[in-house]
């Protein structure tokens, strides 16, 4: 197996989520907020971030596929699990673990906008700088990172490493 070096510690992640949660709480006071997690990667970010949102919120999930087993986004998006509820008139906050090319998220936003929500905003733990292929407006960004391939805290390589409590860089060949 390849080695993993820590890029962002567990303590740094929790501090950032606390800050993001405070901003979200302030912005959505008195509004009907639906937090949408993009599975599978966002489940840890969504769970921990939501504990820092001091408002009554609803939760729903979507699952989309754009990678397969490779480390590069294909740009081909399939919705594997859609929302369970109507979103017309609701404020939608999409929670992502990482945004890289932006292709998947751009597709997701387009498919949600036609359902007439009151608003759609994005919170992401990680933002890969300089590789967006479509412009994405992230209202609640976590950490900007470089092009390295990261795992942990919900992010995987071939289904593994999601359970690490930190963000790590996968170095070497993971198959070794």
Image: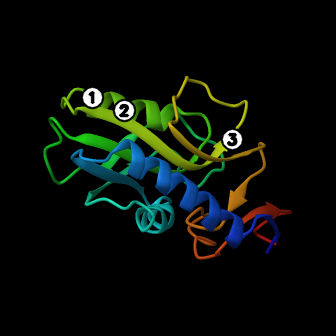
Q: Does the CB distance between marks 2 and 1 fall below 8 Å?
A: yes
Spatial CA distance of label 1 from label 3 is 24 Å
Answer with left or right where residue 45 lies relative to residue 7.
Answer: left
Q: Quadrant of residue 10?
A: bottom right
**Which colour style is shown?**
rainbow
Neighbour tally class for label 3: few under 14, some 14-19, many 20 plus, Cα within 10 Å? some
Number of other residues with Cα within 10 Å of mark 1, as a class: few under 14, some 14 to 19, many 20 or more: some
Residue nearest the observer in this picture, 138 or 23? 23
- Identify the residue under disc 2: 109
> In 3D space, how far apart are the residues under numbered discs 2 and 1 (Cα atoms)?
6 Å
Residue 65 is situated, as x and y percent measured from the top left of the image, at 43, 48
Q: Disc 1 designates what residue?
A: 113
Height in image: 29 above or below 130?
below
Residue pictured at 54% horizontal, 33% vertical: 102
According to the picture, the residue beneath numbered tag 3 turns out to be 128
Q: Position of residue 93 (x, y in %)?
A: 36, 45
Viewer-proximal residue, 8 or 40? 8
Q: Residue at x 72, y 35 (%)?
A: 129
């Amino acid at each position: 197996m390849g080695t993993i070096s820590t890029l962002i510690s567990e303590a740094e992640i929790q501090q950032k989520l606390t800050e993001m949660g405070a901003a979200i709480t302030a912005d959505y006071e008195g509004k009907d907020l639906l937090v949408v997690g993009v599975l599978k990667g966002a489940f840890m970010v969504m769970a921990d971030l939501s504990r820092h949102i001091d408002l009554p919120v609803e939760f729903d999930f979507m699952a989309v596929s754009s990678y397969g087993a490779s480390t590069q986004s294909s740009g081909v998006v399939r919705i594997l699990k859609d929302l369970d509820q109507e979103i017309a008139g609701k404020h939608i906050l999409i929670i992502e673990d990482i945004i890289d090319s932006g292709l998947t998220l751009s597709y997701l936003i387009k498919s949600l906008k036609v359902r007439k929500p009151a608003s759609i905003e994005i919170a992401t733990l990680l933002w890969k700088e300089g590789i967006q292929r479509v412009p994405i407006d992230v209202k609640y960004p976590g950490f900007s990172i470089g092009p390295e391939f990261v795992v942990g805290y919900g992010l995987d390589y071939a289904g593994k490493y999601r359970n690490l409590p930190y963000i790590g860089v996968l170095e070497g060949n993971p198959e070794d």
